[in-house]
C-alpha cells in the first residue's frame, strides 16, 4: 500500500477497485474487513482530492474565456 500523499489518481482508483472486490468476495475476518474498509475510505479521499483539483484547474482555464466573451447589455 503506497502512501496516500504520493498516490496518483489512477493508482488510488485501481487500489480502491481491488479493495472493493476483496470486500465483496467475502471470506475476510472482521478485523481484515475493517482494515480494508478504512483503506478504501482513504483511497476514496485521495481520488476525491484529485478530481476536485482537476475541476478547479478546468474552471480556472475556462474563466478567462468567459470573461473575454462580450457581455450583453440588459434592457
Image (cartoon, grey):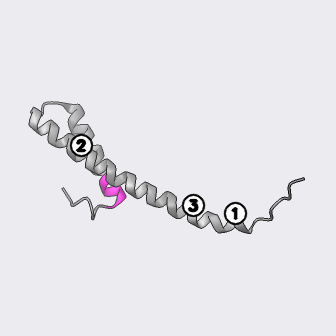
Q: Disc 1 on helix, strand or loop?
A: helix
Q: Position of residue 38 (x, y in %)?
A: 21, 44
Quarter of the image for the N terminus: give it.
bottom left
Residue that badge 2 annotates: 19
- When asked about the image quadrant of residue 17, the answer is top left
Mark in the foreground, 2 or 1? 1
Q: Which residue is mark 1?
A: 66
The residue that appears at 35% across and 56% down in the rendered structure is 10
Using residue 17 as the reference point, say whether residue 63 is left or right of it: right
Tell me which label, 2 or 1, sits earlier in the chain: 2
Spatial separation of the CA atoms under disc 2 and disc 1: 41 Å
Residue at 21%, 47% (x, y): give it: 39
Q: Which numbered marker is on residue 59?
A: 3
The boundaries of the magenta stretch are 8-13
Residue 29: image tag = none
Dots 2 and 1: beta carbons under 8 Å?
no
Give the left or right position of residue 40, taking residue 65 as reference. Answer: left
Amino acid at each position: 500500500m503506497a502512501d496516500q500523499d504520493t498516490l496518483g489518481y489512477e493508482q488510488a482508483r485501481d487500489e480502491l477497485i481491488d479493495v472493493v472486490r476483496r470486500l465483496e468476495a467475502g471470506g475476510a475476518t472482521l478485523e481484515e474487513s475493517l482494515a480494508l474498509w478504512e483503506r478504501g475510505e482513504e483511497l476514496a479521499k485521495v481520488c476525491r482530492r484529485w478530481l476536485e483539483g482537476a475541476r478547479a484547474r478546468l474552471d480556472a482555464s475556462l474563466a478567462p474565456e468567459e470573461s473575454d466573451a462580450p457581455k450583453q447589455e440588459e434592457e
